[in-house]
Amino acid sequence: SQQGEEDPQALSIQEGENATMNCSYKTSINNLQWYRQNSGRGLVHLILIRSNEREKHSGRLRVTLDTSKKSSSLLITASRAADTASYFCATQSRTGGGNKLTFGTGTQLKVEL
Amino acid sequence: DGGITQSPKYLFRKEGQNVTLSCEQNLNHDAMYWYRQDPGQGLRLIYYSQIVNDFQKGDIAEGYSVSREKKESFPLTVTSAQKNPTAFYLCASTRAWGNTEAFFGQGTRLTVV
């Protein structure tokens, strides 16, 4: 089963608007990460937030983490057409042999001109 | 340039055949992962390896096999026991410990003909 569930599954906005995506997960984690995937390509890492952090910024990205609710959100401000992609959250947890990285179901973002 | 390379980019398999997907990294990462992605879906973990000569099953290991004889290489074999192998396969690597981002290959699209 997948660790993360993302909401919404799809999001369509106009250029310049903000886009917010949410992620919920099930078990305890070391950190939560967000990735971007352009159609038919590999994933690219965007931002990592540790389990003891509550908010993190990187350029136009803002990520929050609420470990009590087992949820995270990704905010993309002032969106651009080039932001059109799928966005995935991933949780990293410690297993007996090291780190395990588990992905959510993803949000498809479309930014229209 | 450091990175992770998957080959081939496209692969066609006849019913009943085994095929092997290649994944090589020169990032000196200890941990490597294989994921399967179906159209419009998230990533599901097939196998992962934290160290040479050791690997663990992920959520959907049935019909797949892996080996980890070298740190740089983590090939995935899709066996004839995998009933629905047509999918996009992604390989990733990370450091084994600590808060660490994943680096992805560009993927292999496998189609059963």
Image: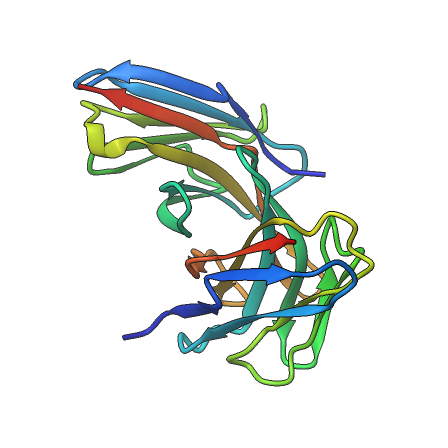
A61 or B84: nearer the viewer: B84
Vertical comparison of B34 with A34: above or below: below
| Residue lying at 36% horizontally and 50% vertically, measured from the top left | A44
Question: What count of labels does the image hold?
Answer: 0
A51 or B91: nearer the viewer: B91
B54 horizontally vs A82: left or right: right
Residue B36 in the image, given as x and y percentages of width and height: 61, 50
| Residue lying at 50% horizontally and 22% vertically, measured from the top left | A9
| Residue lying at 41% horizontally and 35% vertically, measured from the top left | A87
Check the image and tell me how it is coloured: rainbow
Q: Quadrant of residue A20?
A: top left
| Residue lying at 59% horizontally and 41% vertically, measured from the top left | B38
**Residue A91 in view here:** yes
Q: Quadrant of residue B31?
A: bottom right
**Residue A73 in view here:** no
A6 or B14: nearer the viewer: B14
Quadrant of the frame with the N terminus of chain B: bottom left
Residue A86 in the image, given as x and y percentages of width and height: 41, 34
Vertical comparison of A41 with A55: above or below: below
Residue A11 in the image, given as x and y percentages of width and height: 39, 18
Q: Single out the residue that lies furthest toward the bottom.
A: B70
Quadrant of the frame with the C terminus of chain B: bottom right
Q: Quadrant of residue A104?
A: top right
B38 horizontally vs B27: left or right: right
Residue A12 in the image, given as x and y percentages of width and height: 34, 16
B64 horizontally vs B26: left or right: right
